Image (cartoon, rainbow, N blue to C red):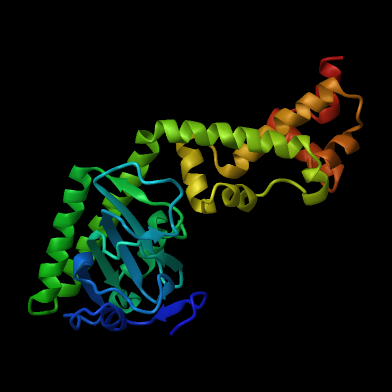
Amino acid sequence: MIPENSPIRIKTISQFHTLRGLAKPKHPLISVVDFEDMGQPSESLRQSLIFDFYMISVKRDMDHKYRYGQQNCDFDEGVMFGMAPNQVLSVTRGVNGRNPSGWMIMIHPDFFWNTQMANAIRKYAFFDYSVSEALFLSEDEEMKLQQIIENIKQEYQANIDKFSQNIIISQLETLLNYSERFYQRQFITRQKVHHQFLERLEILLESYFEGDNPEKEGLPSVQHLSDEFNMSPQYMRSLLKSLTGQTTQQYIHEKLIEKAKEKLLTTNLSISEIAFGLGFEHSQSFSKLFKSKTETSPIEFRQLFN
């Protein structure tokens, strides 16, 4: 029996097939499987898995709990997420012990050897989210991806020839491009959730700057904020960029400048005291940032209103 806290590293697609009671894969470097065909692992109700290959999946009727979600599922049709090699997926099986419906595709990095996709796949933010965010699919979106998956499955299950790799990679690229499009759509269609996110982010930064956190911890970091929301830094950046046109760092600086202006106009604190209270080690760094954002120095800004 493997201890619950010990992640299981799955090095090959064949190893995964064996672990889940599936037939030997038709191709050693790529495989599409149906969740309903998978057997249940017997070791534990909770497992942490580390894959040495890429994985994309669409799940429905989820009885299991997966540690990857930023929000609760609020779409009935399907939930999609992707994993890159060496990321950790924690799974808690439901009490009913049933598998979700849906599919997953596994692609070993060796499949991309000597192709442009070997480097291009790293540009997709879909794999940079550190398994923090799910993509909620509409029925039409799910059908679109299902068609692509069927094309891939038919191609690698047929007789492999010199064209097969390029054809499959072309289909995979299409799959990833649609995934990127659907993520951008999600930023728009989940407006209520995202409005609540902005409200909470505003309160979080306000609380941070009002307390003694800046003096103790320094400026709020992107990682700190993303951890507070159980998001990866990459996802938060994409979300804020979509909602505000700013990166997370730019958004933090904007709120910092607002707080600095407030202190400059409503207190008699020195520039050094304000800088230190906002998390700067050196007042020169504060003054430089302030001037880059407002085109005036802190002293000039204070004098304008006095």
Q: Taking 68 as reference, is 266 above or below it?
A: above
Report how many numbered discs are placed on residues in the image.
Answer: 0
At horizontal 21% and vertical 78% (from top left) the residue drawn is: 22
Q: Residue furthest top?
A: 306
Is residue 218 toward the left or the right of residue 189 in the image? right
Q: Position of residue 17 (x, y in %)?
A: 26, 79
Q: Residue furthest left?
A: 159
Quadrant for residue 122, please give it. bottom left
Q: Taking 121 as reference, is 186 above or below it?
A: above
At horizontal 82% and vertical 21% (from top left) the residue drawn is: 265
Q: Position of residue 277 (x, y in %)?
A: 84, 39
At horizontal 43% and vertical 79% (from top left) the residue drawn is: 8
Is residue 281 toward the left or the right of residue 237 in the image? right
Q: Between residue 93 and residue 235, name the one nearer to us.
A: 93
Is residue 220 toward the left or the right of residue 161 in the image? right
Is residue 207 toward the left or the right of residue 98 in the image? right
Screen quadrant of the C terminus: top right
Q: Position of residue 100 (x, y in %)?
A: 26, 60
At horizontal 69% and vertical 33% (from top left) the residue drawn is: 206
Q: Is residue 181 visible?
A: no
Q: Taking 119 as reference, is 239 above or below it?
A: above
Q: Between residue 138 and residue 278, name the one nearer to us.
A: 138
Screen quadrant of the N terminus: bottom left
Q: Between residue 119 and residue 215, name the one nearer to us.
A: 215
Q: Is residue 282 visible?
A: yes
Q: Residue furthest front?
A: 95
